[in-house]
Image (cartoon, rainbow, N blue to C red):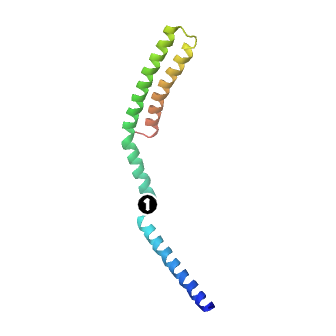
Amino acid sequence: MKKRMKKSGHHLYKVLGTAIIIFAAAAGSYAQDGNAGISEATNQVKGYFGTGTQLMYAIGAIVGLVGAIKVYKKWNDGEHDTGKVASSWFGSCIFLVVVATVLKSFFGV
């Protein structure tokens, strides 16, 4: 009985060893050069960056219009926190434009 267990255990190690070798060979065949992968990712990001910047400007325009309407309504109602709302609205518009410009120059696009 011990002989049979020893033999089946040895057989199990052979099967596991073969499976590991096959897995390593398959994984190696799908691997690519790290520099090539990073270059490809950089090119893809640069390709979408112009569209993303335009989208950020469009979102800034919408936020600006909504904020302007909100500030105008508060001003007409005579509320006391109009200046605070106006400054936060103006700051958010400036932030969106500055972020788009800084990211554009940072990535060299």
For image coordinates 47% across by 29% down, the residue present is 96
Q: Is residue 8 above or below residue 99?
A: below
Label 1 element class: loop
Quarter of the image where one finds residue 8? bottom right
Residue 70 rendering spot, x and y as whole percentages: 48, 17
For the residue pair 51 and 74, the one nearer the viewer reads as 74
For the residue pair 109 and 52, the one nearer the viewer reads as 52
For the residue pair 94 and 18, the one nearer the viewer reads as 18
For the residue pair 50 and 13, the one nearer the viewer reads as 13
Q: Residues within 10 Å of mark 1 (few under 14, many from 20)?
A: few
Residue 63 rendering spot, x and y as whole percentages: 44, 24
Q: Is residue 47 above or below residue 24?
A: above
For image coordinates 41% across by 68% down, the residue present is 29
For image coordinates 43% across by 36% down, the residue present is 104
Residue 53 rendering spot, x and y as whole percentages: 40, 34
Q: Is residue 65 above or below residue 26?
A: above
Quarter holding the N terminus is: bottom right
Q: Is residue 38 above or below residue 51?
A: below
Number of marks drawn: 1
Q: Is residue 74 left or right of residue 47?
A: right
Quarter holding the C terminus is: top left
Quarter of the image where one finds residue 107? top left
Residue that carries the numbered disc 1 in the rendered image:
33
Quarter of the image where one finds residue 25? bottom left
Q: Report the amino acid beneath label 1.
A: Asp
Query: Quick one: which residue is furthest to the right in this view?
Result: 2
Q: Is residue 12 left or right of residue 2?
A: left
Residue 50 rendering spot, x and y as whole percentages: 37, 37
